[in-house]
C-alpha cells in the first residue's frame, strides 16, 4: 500500500522525520540504566532513591483502605476535581505546618508526584532557549524535564551551606547583560539531592532578595524537608516570600511513592494556570490515590511515622559515614543531617562515570555525578551514594566494595595517569605487567 | 525588598511577563464550568462523561485490595517501572484481544489515563504551528492538549459512518499544497465522543490507505470500543496497520477512572520515545493503581462486568432516544449503538452555547457543540447529551426539560429571528408583548 515516493524516516523508525524538535533531546537518563543493574540481588545498590517502606504498617493500611473503599468507593473510583480532592487539600497544610509553612488549601494543586509539578511549571514558563537556573549539581529528574522543554539550564555553584548567593547574582547579571531571559531558579534547599547539603538560614533571605530584585521566580522543591535526622526543620523560602515562590511537596518520602501524589502551592495567578495545565495533561489526579492518602492522614499517626523514618534514615546515614571514614578516607563529603544522599568527591584523577562499570562488576552501584549536570558539563569527580534503601550492614559492605574499586583505579592513575582509565573501544587496556 | 524599577507583570499576576508562549493558550474548557453546575443536585446533568460505577462490586473490591496490599504492599506503595508494571502489561493484551487486537506486552506503555498518552504523543510530535488532523467534532480533552502545544487543529467532517475519506484526503492534499506539515490524524473510530457514531468497516482500510500514502501517523483513541450495546466490536485501525497507528486504551470506562490508568500501544521507536517522555513527566505511573487493576483483571470476571456495563448503558441509551423521539422531534440525531453520547442537531436558528444558561435555569445541563471544535470554529448548531451517568427516569426528565427550553428558543427565533437570542450585555431582551 505504501507509495515509495512517500517513504520517510528510516528502517528502524518510519516516523523519524515527524518528531517535534523537543523530542530529539529525549535520552535515557543516567540513573535509568542503573535501575536494571540495581535489580540484580547480588549488587548492593547505593544508586536508587527509593524510600525504605519496611516500617509502614501494611496490615493496618490494608484494613483502612478496604474500609475507605466500602464507604467512599463510588467517589474514590470516579473522576475527581482537577485541582485535587478538597479534603486532601485541607489536610496538606497540616503537613506543611510541621515546617512552619502557612498555606491556603485554595492555593494547593495536587499532582502526579511532585515530578508532574516540575513538568507543569516548566511547560508554563519555558520557551525553547529560556534560562532555568539550578544548583550545580541538581536533581536528575528535573534536568530531564528541562531538557524536554529545551531550556538552557545554567547551574550555580553550591557549597556546604547550599547555593552561593554571590555566584547566583553574578550569573543572573551576566545573563541579563547578554539579554537572556531567566525564567526561574529551581532550588532544593533542604537535604539536597544529590549534594546532601542544606541552604543555611543566613543565606535564605539573601537568595530571595537577589531573585526578587531580578524578578526571577523561585521553584522550591522540598521532598525531604521533614526528614531532618534530629527533627530539625528550616524556614521555607515560601514562608519568607509567598508571592515569589512556587513550593513543591510530596508524599513519596514521608509516606509512600506508589500513590504518585505530590503537590504545589503557588501564587494565585500561577496556581490557576497550573491547574489548567494539569487538567489538560491528565484531567485529574488519581482519586484512589488521594482518598488513600487522605485516609492515612486522618486515621494514622503520620507524625510519629515521620519520626520513625527519621531515626531509620539516620541509622543508615551513620552506617554510611562510618564506613566512608573507615574505607574511603581518600574521598571527601559533607555529612548530611537529613534526607537520602551523600555526595562523594573522588580523589584527583578518578572519573565516576568511567569507573561505574568496574564498580558494578565489583557488585556495588552508585550514580555518577555527571547525571546531575546539564548535558556535557562536568560532575565526573563526584558520585552520589544513597543510604535510604539498603540495610546498614549492606551499606557498609557496599562502601567496602566501592573502596576496592577506588583503590584499584587510584593505583592505575598513579601509575599511568588518568588517560589510561578509558581504553579505546575494542582495544584492551594493557595489563600493568606488560609495561 | 522589591526594587520598583524591576516590578513587572501586573497587580493580579506579577509573573505575567514570564510565561511561555504556550501558556497564553490555556483557557478553562467549556465543559469545566459545567462540572460546577452539574454538581447541583436539582440539575439533571446530561453534560458530564462520568461512567456509572453503581454496578461495581465495592465490597469484593475492598477485600481484594486489602489482600493485595497485605501481600504486595511493599511493591504497590513503591516507585515502579516507567513503562508500567510488567504483569499489567501482560494482561492488557488480553483486554485488547476482545476487540481482536494483537499486542505485544513490550509495546504497551501504561499512562495516567489515556489523557496522558495524548499529551505525550502531542509533546513528541507537535512543534508550534504543526497540523493535527481531527474529526469535526472531536474530544474536548484532546483539543485542550493540542492547544497547549500550539498545534493547528484541522477538523475533517464526519457523517453517520465516521470520518469521510474523501474529505480527509482533500484536506491533507490542500495542506500539502500549502507546504504545511501534517503530523498525525487523531481519530476516535468507535462510539465517538461527542458524535456517537462509529467509523464503518468499509471506510477503515480507506482511511489507513490515505494516511499511509501521505505519511500521516494515526492516533487511534479507543476508550469506548468494548461498550458496543450488542457486544459487537470493530476492526481496530491498529489491527489493519500496526506500524502506522498509536493505539490508546483506557480502564476508565470498562472498569473505573479513579485509578487513572490508561495505556498506549505504539510502534517500537515511538514507544521508546513515549516511555522517555512519560518518565520525564511523572517518573512512573502509580504502582498502587496498577496493582489494583492487575488484581481486578486476575480475580474478577471483568468480561462479565463489561457485559453488564453494556446492558446498563444500552438501557440508558434507549431511555434517551425514546425521550428524544417523544419530546424533541424537531431535533436530529444518529442513534448510537455503543458508548456514552448522543450528538443532537438543533432546529435551524438555535444556538447551543447561547441556550445553555437558559437550560441550566430550567435545571438541565448539556455541553454545547462549540466545545468540540478548535477555537472559534462552529458547533453551535449541535449539543452533546450524555446518557452514561443519570438513571433512565432522570434522562427522560432531563430531555423533557430541554425540550421546554428548545421550544421557547424556537418560538423566539420564529418571532424575531436568531439575532434576538443574544441580548447585548446589560440590556434586557425586549419582552415579546412589547413588540
Image (spheres, coloured by chain):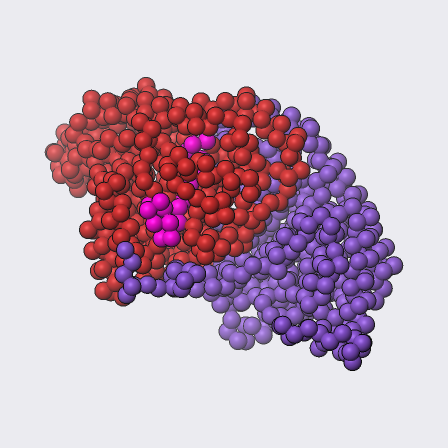
Chain colours: A purple, B red
Residue depicted at 21% across the width and 46% down the height:
B164
Mark yes or no: residue B299 visible: yes
Residue A15 left/right relative to A263: left
| Residue B87: image location, x then y, percent | 55, 39
Residue B322 image-quadrant placement: top left
Q: Quadrant of the C terminus of chain B?
A: top left
Residue B192 left/right relative to A35: left
Residue depicted at 27% across the width and 38% down the height:
B198
A7, above or below A190, in the image: below
Q: How many marks?
A: 0
Q: Which residues are magenta?
A: B237-255
| Residue B60: image location, x then y, percent | 55, 22
Residue A313 left/right relative to A379: right
| Residue A137: image location, x then y, percent | 66, 63
Q: As drawn, which residue projects farthest toward the front?
A: A434
Q: Quadrant of the N terminus of chain B?
A: bottom right
Residue depicted at 43% across the width and 28% down the height:
B303
Q: As drawn, which residue projects farthest toward the bottom?
A: A435
Residue B299 in the magenta stretch? The answer is: no
| Residue B140: image location, x then y, percent | 35, 43
B3, above or below A192, in the image: below
Q: As drawn, which residue projects farthest toward the top?
A: B393
Mark yes or no: residue B21 visible: no
Residue depicted at 60% across the width and 50% down the height:
A247
Residue B306 image-quadrant placement: top left
Amino acid at each position: 500500500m505504501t507509495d515509495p515516493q512517500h517513504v520517510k524516516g528510516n528502517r528502524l523508525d518510519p516516523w523519524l522525520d515527524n518528531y517535534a524538535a523537543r523530542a530529539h533531546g529525549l535520552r535515557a537518563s543516567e540513573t535509568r540504566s542503573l535501575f536494571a543493574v540495581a535489580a540484580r540481588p547480588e549488587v548492593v545498590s547505593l544508586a536508587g532513591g527509593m524510600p525504605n517502606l519496611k516500617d509502614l504498617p501494611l496490615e493496618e493500611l490494608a484494613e483502612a483502605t478496604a474500609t475507605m473503599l466500602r464507604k467512599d468507593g463510588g467517589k474514590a473510583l470516579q473522576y475527581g476535581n482537577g485541582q485535587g480532592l478538597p479534603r486532601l487539600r485541607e489536610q496538606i497544610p497540616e503537613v506543611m505546618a510541621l515546617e512552619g509553612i502557612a498555606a491556603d488549601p485554595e492555593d494547593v494543586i495536587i499532582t502526579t508526584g511532585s515530578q508532574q509539578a516540575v513538568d507543569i511549571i516548566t511547560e508554563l514558563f519555558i520557551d525553547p532557549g529560556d534560562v532555568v537556573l539550578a544548583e550545580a549539581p541538581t536533581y536528575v529528574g528535573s534536568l530531564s524535564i528541562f531538557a524536554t522543554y529545551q531550556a538552557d539550564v545554567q547551574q550555580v555553584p553550591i557549597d556546604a551551606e547550599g547555593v552561593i548567593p554571590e555566584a547566583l547574582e553574578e550569573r543572573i547579571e551576566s545573563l541579563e547583560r547578554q539579554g537572556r531571559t531567566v525564567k526561574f531558579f529551581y532550588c532544593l534547599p533542604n537535604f539536597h539531592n544529590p549534594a546532601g547539603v542544606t541552604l543555611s538560614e543566613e543565606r535564605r533571605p539573601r537568595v530571595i532578595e537577589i531573585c526578587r530584585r531580578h524578578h526571577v521566580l523561585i521553584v522550591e522543591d522540598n521532598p525531604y524537608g521533614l526528614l531532618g535526622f534530629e527533627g530539625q526543620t528550616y524556614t521555607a523560602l515560601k514562608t519568607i516570600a509567598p508571592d515569589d515562590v512556587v513550593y513543591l511537596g510530596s508524599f513519596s518520602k514521608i509516606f509512600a511513592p506508589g500513590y504518585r501524589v505530590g503537590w504545589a502551592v503557588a501564587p494565585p495567578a500561577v496556581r490557576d494556570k497550573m491547574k489548567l495545565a494539569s487538567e489538560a495533561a491528565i484531567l485529574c489526579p488519581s482519586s484512589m490515590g488521594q482518598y488513600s492518602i487522605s485516609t492515612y492522614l486522618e486515621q494514622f499517626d503520620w507524625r510519629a511515622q515521620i519520626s520513625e523514618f527519621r531515626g531509620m534514615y539516620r541509622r543508615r546515614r551513620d552506617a554510611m559515614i562510618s564506613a566512608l571514614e573507615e574505607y574511603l578516607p581518600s574521598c571527601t563529603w559533607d555529612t548530611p543531617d537529613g534526607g537520602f544522599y551523600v555526595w562523594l568527591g573522588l580523589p584527583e584523577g578518578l572519573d565516576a562515570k568511567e569507573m561505574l562499570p568496574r564498580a558494578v562488576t565489583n557488585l556495588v552501584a552508585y550514580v555518577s555525578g555527571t547525571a546531575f549536570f546539564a548535558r556535557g558539563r562536568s560532575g565526573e569527580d563526584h558520585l552520589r551514594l544513597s543510604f535510604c534503601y539498603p540495610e546498614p550492614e549492606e551499606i557498609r559492605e557496599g562502601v567496602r566494595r566501592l573502596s576496592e574499586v577506588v583503590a584499584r583505579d587510584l593505583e592505575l592513575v598513579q601509575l599511568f595517569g588518568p588517560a589510561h582509565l578509558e581504553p579505546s573501544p575494542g582495544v584492551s587496556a594493557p595489563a600493568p605487567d606488560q609495561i
